[in-house]
Image (cartoon, helix red, strand yellow):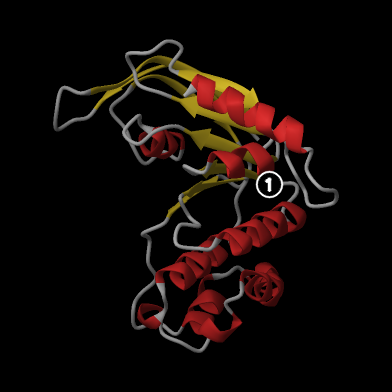
Amino acid sequence: MLIECHDLNYQYPSSSTQVFQGLSCRISGPGFHALFGPSGVGKTTLAKMIAGLVKGFSGEINVKTKAGILYTYNLERLPGWSVVGEHLKEISPPDKTKYLQNLTESFGIEECLKTRFSRLSLGQQNRTNLTRYLLQDFDLLIMDESLANVDETTRETIILKIKSMFSQKAFLYISHNVVEVAKFCKEILVLRDVRKSPQITAIKGQDHTGEQPPDRRALEQTMLEIVHAS
């Protein structure tokens, strides 16, 4: 899996606000990559451009994948009248339904399977929606604040489970949690305002897998690098 962005320039169609000017970056290989930065710098816009959901920019985005790219965000919803378990089975490829029980157990949503989506809490909805995407075919899954409204301990369990079950897949994780991206991601793309240079900086993360306790000093150093680049 390889994503290469070259000299991207973009402004919002409804205004003259410039979002990117000459932005270039690269995402390669499996594992957790992060897109980090303050609100309003264009994280979601860049993610949607990579996923092919935003057009009208200049520059090039070269994508090399077999199964393609999926994009999911924290406010995305299943049909409110849908019974969660039935919906997940209906939309999942036959060879992926074997993962359903494993994921629902690990994500703590077993009790949600017999419930309509509209009756779930926001955290349950986000975990259910993420499960839906993990049951599909993809090479890169973009997770745009997909674990919002989920408590820290459960988020950590979910991230480690995904890294274990889908070690050959790539993920672009968008979050405002500097500790989380420094700890779990192998590379962090730090995006900042278009008026600053460079607009994007790549930082090596700790890529924690849960097998051993993270190195606290190394984690703190990575966090400082991220904050400095923001």
Query: Does residue 6 appear in the picture of this structure?
Result: no
User: Tag 1's secondary structure?
Assistant: loop
Residue ID at (15%, 22%): 16
Q: Which residue is mark 1?
A: 169
Residue in the foreground of this view, choosing between 149 and 14: 149
Residue 179 in the image: above or below residue 188: below
Image quarter of the N terminus? top right
Residue in the foreground of this view, choosing between 122 and 95: 122
- 19 relative to 179 in the view: left or right: left
Give the residue type at disc 1: Lys
Residue ID at (62%, 69%): 107
Query: Does residue 144 appear in the picture of this structure?
Result: yes
Residue in the foreground of this view, choosing between 4 and 212: 212
- 199 relative to 21 in the view: left or right: right
- 19 relative to 60 in the view: left or right: left
**In the rendering, at what x and y percent does residue 151 appear?**
54, 63
Residue 92 in the image: above or below residue 11: below
**In the rendering, at what x and y percent does residue 29 appear?**
70, 34
**In the rendering, at what x and y percent does residue 34 appear?**
56, 37
Residue at the outermost right position: 212
